[in-house]
Amino acid sequence: MPAIPAPITGILAYRMEVLQCTHNCLQQQGEVWYTRGMLTWLIATITSLSQSVQQVRRSSLLPLIAPFLLLIAVGTLVYARLESWTLLDALYATIITITTVGYGDLSPQTATGRVFAIFFTLFAIGLAGYALSTAAAIVFEGHNAKMALKRLENRMKKISALSNHVIVCGGGILANRTAGEFKRRSVPFVIIEADEAKLKRTMLWLHVPYVEKRQRHYATLAEVDLSVEERKTVQELAEETGILYMLEDPTDEQQLRAAGVNRAYGVVAAMDDDRDNTTIILSARDMARRLGNTQLRIVASARDELNMHTLYLAGADRVISPNMIGGFSVASQMLDHDMAELWDQMLYQSTEQMRFGDLKAVDYPDLIGKTTDDVRRTLAQLVIAIRRDGKFLYTPEPTEIVRPDDILIVMGPNL
């Protein structure tokens, strides 16, 4: 074999050195990468274990895990002491005792060990039964909590999609009747009430089957079973009635914002305390102004007539006194029997659609230039007054011509 020239040998040796150097560098770099990967995995594992421990500490599982660990430790040490077993054998015996597996390959041989095994087994089985039932309850509660959170998210998503709606603040009788009228006239609304009992009562009176049972009982004294509806939760009643609600404090301006005060047509302040109504009015008016909803209409109730002026000063567009309206109704019932009966049917009969309302002539351009009698024949609405130039024209003649700026006060169905 001919000899390799020296220059070629030098080149080959140089290339071998380069390859060896490259190999060493790659090996060192691989070791660095491997070390970094191990450190990353170790840090991630420690972090995951730490988070798991924190979750266990915050959850209800810790009271269940701690007794089990203590039971295993006691069983292991006692078995090792009484039977002279190794810690591994004692741990093995403890586990198969707790789990009631009983392979039979390892059992106490001393009398003391057997007596301990008897009481240890009974205690372990009792603890296991308690732990399983408690764990099942925890899992069930966790599932319910997740479902409740999901329902809350869905409900808030629907509320966030509302626009030109009414926010009803309060869950008392007045708010209940207000919401019922909105529902009857297909006006979108959301109820805000912090007291779950009041909110449930409102939901019940918006639940048609419940109201029908109540009316049947009042009319005929028939026995009715109201427990079916009364056992239901607020969420269940809301789902059946389609009512949107927020179990929150309506005096909190953040709750008004969550209810969409910037998109709402109006706010009803119907709390039992006039001070709460004042707070709601101030918050709603200020937020609506800052959020660009300057046309927000606010209607409030005054429990004390002396507070009506204060509520107007707070920013209410209209303040209602339930006591004054109630007194008028009582007098009408005493003096004008038939008119009062008509009024009762309009208010309390769920199938009655006759209502008072107003029609703006600009919204019905076909009526401009027509007579009030044409309005009655065209829309089935009886014109009982006309607001014109800031004044009311009562009982207009059938030949009265409708002007572009008129607001017709009418009585008729489906308003």
Image (cartoon, rainbow, N blue to C red):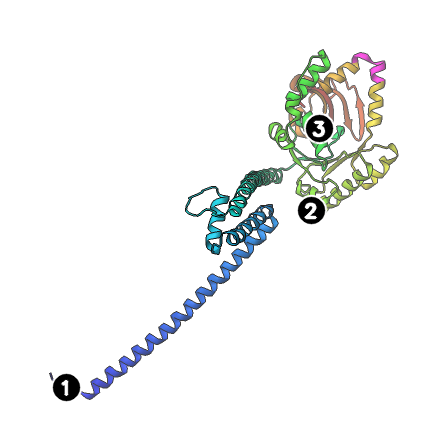
**Residue type of the residue flagged with mark 2:** Leu
Q: CA distance from mark 3 to mark 2?
A: 33 Å
Give the secondary structure at mark 1: loop
**Residue type of the residue flagged with mark 3:** Arg
Q: Nearer the viewer, residue 400 or 7?
A: 7
Question: Relative to 152, does residue 342 appear above or below in the rendering?
Answer: above
Residue extent of the magenta highlight? 331-338
Asked which quadrant contains residue 233, the reply is: top right
Residue that sits furthest to the right in the current view: 306
Asked which quadrant contains residue 37, the reply is: bottom left
Classed neighbour count for the residue bearing mark 2: other residues with Cα under 10 Å, few (<14), some (14–19), many (≥20): few
Residue 144 percent across, percent down from the top left: 58, 38
Residue 54 percent across, percent down from the top left: 58, 53
Is residue 351 in view from this perspective? no
Residue that sits furthest to the front in the current view: 111
Question: Relative to 97, does residue 367 appear above or below in the rendering?
Answer: above
Q: Residue at x 77, y 40 (%)?
A: 281
**Residue type of the residue flagged with mark 1:** Ala
**Nearest to viewer (mark 3 / mark 1):** 1
Give the secondary structure at mark 2: loop
Q: Nearer the viewer, residue 159 or 91?
A: 91
Q: Which residue is mark 2?
A: 291
Q: Which residue is mark 1?
A: 3
Main secondary-structure element of the magenta-colored stretch: helix
Q: Which residue is mark 3?
A: 201
Q: Nearer the viewer, residue 282 or 72?
A: 72
